[in-house]
Image: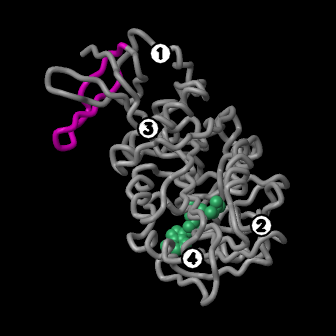
Amino acid sequence: MRFETEKYVSGGYSLARDADGVLFIKGALPGEVVDASLEYRKGKVRFFKLDGVVTPSPDRIDPGCPLYGICGGCDFLHVTPQASALLKEESVKENLSRIGKIRYGFPFEKPSYAKREGYRIRVNFHIEKGRLGFLARKGNKFVPIACCPLLDEKINEFLSKCDFYKGKTLPVFSGDDGISIGNEVVTFSGYKVNALSFFQSNKYLFKDLLDFVKENTVGSTVVDLYSGLGTFSRLFEGEKDVIAVERSEHSLKLFKLNAPSARVYSGDVASFSLPNGENAGTVIVDPPRIGLDKNVPKLITSWHPGRIIYVSCDSTTLSRDLPRFEGYKVTKGKLFDFYPGSSHEESAFVLERI
Ligand SMILES: C[S@@+](CC[C@H](N)C(=O)[O-])C[C@H]1O[C@@H](n2cnc3c(N)ncnc32)[C@H](O)[C@@H]1O
């Protein structure tokens, strides 16, 4: 069936309509005429697969990867880097307004994006019969990978060695001074990192995110929740008092190397209480995709910070969480296209006390 798409939604889908209402087409871009067929239904919502592009968008490009459509790693390689960032920004705004009922009268800073080739310094390979690869886009089939255009060159070199690997998965991190495939510590941009701990995966945009967080931090005490190995805490070494909370033991070991003067607490953010008499100038939260525990916004607002900076990798949970910060309003947002080639987004927001 032939459709003309209206707008990008999220997850690589664009919206179109027919006599039965709206439908979503994976891989179609806004303003395109495409041929598509019904793939599945979820309740009343219909999801279509792209069979062909009749009138392409000017933002459509050659994906440049022979495994595109087969390997499950990417679903946004057919979009220019600039359009990728702008479409994701639209999608974040849509979620803020539809789910969060937040009117974005606040400014969005120009989105941050860069080339995608070689951007990725952190990856988790699947292993089958000793070989490394990714899972297929459909089903759980294994796709062996000899080289991936998005991976940092040191990871591609590592892939070309053709060793025999054991286990189900292999996390790999590429530092400035070598590769980590377990808990061996390497250095990236001054940070001590290993493959077992969370670390931001886009080497080109990493500094942009740090700059945004640092520029928007106020006060003399920073509370860094979901701190990982100290990515944000390290920014304030020797400048501000930092209190951090993280629950991963792997990350906590590295945290002490990255931000030695910060006070770091081990455990669940939801059960953390700020030590008596402490103030929070700025609270930084960077939760996993599931977002914040229901009680966490209330916990944070009880400390009366001047600002809250929310770094998010999922704008649906972000949009649910932001209105829960009672007495605060969003004053600024920015999209970071940390995962070009895939429809995943990353964004950061500043909230100020009303
Ligand atoms: C998206 S990462 C962010 C890490 C860090 N801010 C960074 O930029 O590298 C989320 C971190 O939160 C930690 N985490 C997840 N749930 C948590 C919880 N309930 N309490 C404390 N830490 C948690 C994870 O171990 C992970 O290190």
Q: Mark on residue 236?
A: 2
Is 114 or 181 nearer to us in this picture? Answer: 114
For the record, the magenta segment spans: 33-50
Amino acid carrying mark 3 in the image? Ser
Residue at position x 35%, y 48% in the image:
101
Mark 3 — residue? 91
126 falls in the magenta region:
no
Disc 1 to disc 4, C-alpha distance: 45 Å
Q: Nearer the viewer, residue 141 or 275?
A: 275
Mark 1 or mark 4, which has the lower sequence index?
Answer: 1
| Residue farthest along the front direction in this orientation | 354
Q: Amino acid at mark 2?
A: Phe
Q: Quadrant of ligand 1?
A: bottom right
Q: Residue at x 33, y 44 (%)?
A: 98
Give me the disc on residue 247: 4
Against 317, is 90 above or below? above
Q: Earlier in the sequence, mark 3 or mark 4?
A: 3
Comparing labels 2 and 4, the label whose residue is closer to the camera: 2
Instruction: Please identify the dominant SS of the magenta region.
Output: strand
Q: Nearer the viewer, residue 169 or 28?
A: 28
Tell me the amino acid under the disc marked 1: Ser
Where's residue 295, x and y in %?
40, 74
Between the C-alphas of marks 3 and 1, the distance is: 18 Å
Proximity of marks 1 and 4: CB atoms separated by less than 8 Å? no
Circle 3: element type: helix
Sequence-wise, the earlier of marks 2 and 4 is 2
Give the mark nearest the N terminus, 1 or 2. Answer: 1
The residue depicted at 76 percent of the width and 55 percent of the height is 179
Q: Dot 4: within a 10 Å radius of its alpha carbon, few (fewer than 14), some, or many (20 or more) residues?
A: some
Would you place residue 71 above or below residue 227 in this image? above
Please rate how many residues cluster around mark 3, counting C-alpha atoms within 10 Å: few if below 14, some from 14 to 19, many from 20: many
